[in-house]
Amino acid sequence: MAGLGGCSLLVTGANRGIGLGLVQRFLGMPTPPEWVFAGCRDPKGQRAQELQNLASKHPNLVIIPLDVSNPASIKAAAATVEKQLGGSGLTLLINNAGIVRNANLDDETLENMTEIYTTNTIGPLLMGQAFLPLLKKAAQGSPGSALSCSKAAIINISSTGGCISAPLGWDLMQIVSYRCSKAALNMLTKCQSLGYREHGILCVALHPGWVQTDMGSTAGHQPPVTVDASVQGMLKVLSSLSEKDTGTFLDWEGKVLPW
């Protein structure tokens, strides 16, 4: 993905899986972003060891404590990023953090639904609100009026599990709370695209594929897509997004997905 040399971006859930893969790929670009903010719940914990190793080699990587289910944590993270940017804006917000519980329709619970909605749907809503001033600043500082990921964008990592008209994989895993949360995330993306367009911010829901991560293997089956293939595909898609794409639901290969 070209054109990010003077940009800054934030990835949530960045300590493993797709989030870590995105951070690694951004840092490895010929002209990497000026700042890469990697959000995770426990930056000093064992699960963030790979991030810590990356930070020791890349001074433009800043690991920040961030629990997207906690409004106070989100507010503190926004303040940290704003201070680090020193008057510049945040170009790209990638809401990647997500959780799943392998529950069926008959044994789904209030607790499961609440926990998963809070992380997968409400988290991206609150992140968009908290980082809106920095995204607006990036958009205002970018020449031209056309929307793009190099101007200002919110990318919500969604799933075909949230497709209402084509609920893929039902026989393989019902994961009701996860499906509902991602369908709601898709609507949030549409709402954000309508509400933030006037500020010059592009908003897209992106399905990364069924990826070989801890989360992707929840049902006990081997997913077909590697993290590297997914991340490479998504970055290619991000680099091609324009005005016409805001408010859409795409996959890691750029295909338009059904709502």
Image (tube, rainbow, N blue to C red):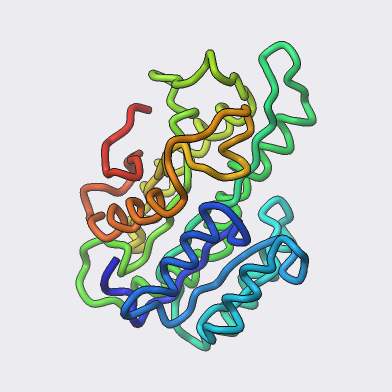
Q: Is residue 124 left or right of residue 112?
A: left
Percent position of residue 68, x then y: 66, 54
Q: Residue at x 73, y 34 (%)?
A: 114
Measured along the vertical axis of the image, is residue 178 above or below residue 149? above
Percent position of residue 222, x then y: 53, 33
Percent position of residue 28, x then y: 40, 74
Percent position of residue 109, x then y: 77, 23
Q: Residue at x 54, y 86 (%)?
A: 59
Q: Is residue 34 left or right of residue 247?
A: right
Where does the N terminus fall, quadrant-wise? bottom left
Measured along the vertical axis of the image, is residue 80 above or below residue 160? below
Q: Residue at x 20, y 72 (%)?
A: 144
- Asked whether the viewer can see residue 231, the reply is yes
Where does the C terminus fall, quadrant-wise? top left
Quarter location, residue 62: bottom right
Measured along the vertical axis of the image, is residue 168 above or below residue 30? above
| Viewer-nearest residue: 27 or 125 | 27
Q: Is residue 16 left or right of residue 128?
A: right
- Asked whether the viewer can see residue 187, the reply is no
Q: Residue at x 35, y 74 (%)?
A: 29
| Viewer-nearest residue: 33 or 49 | 49
Could you tell me how many numbered marks the image carries?
A: 0
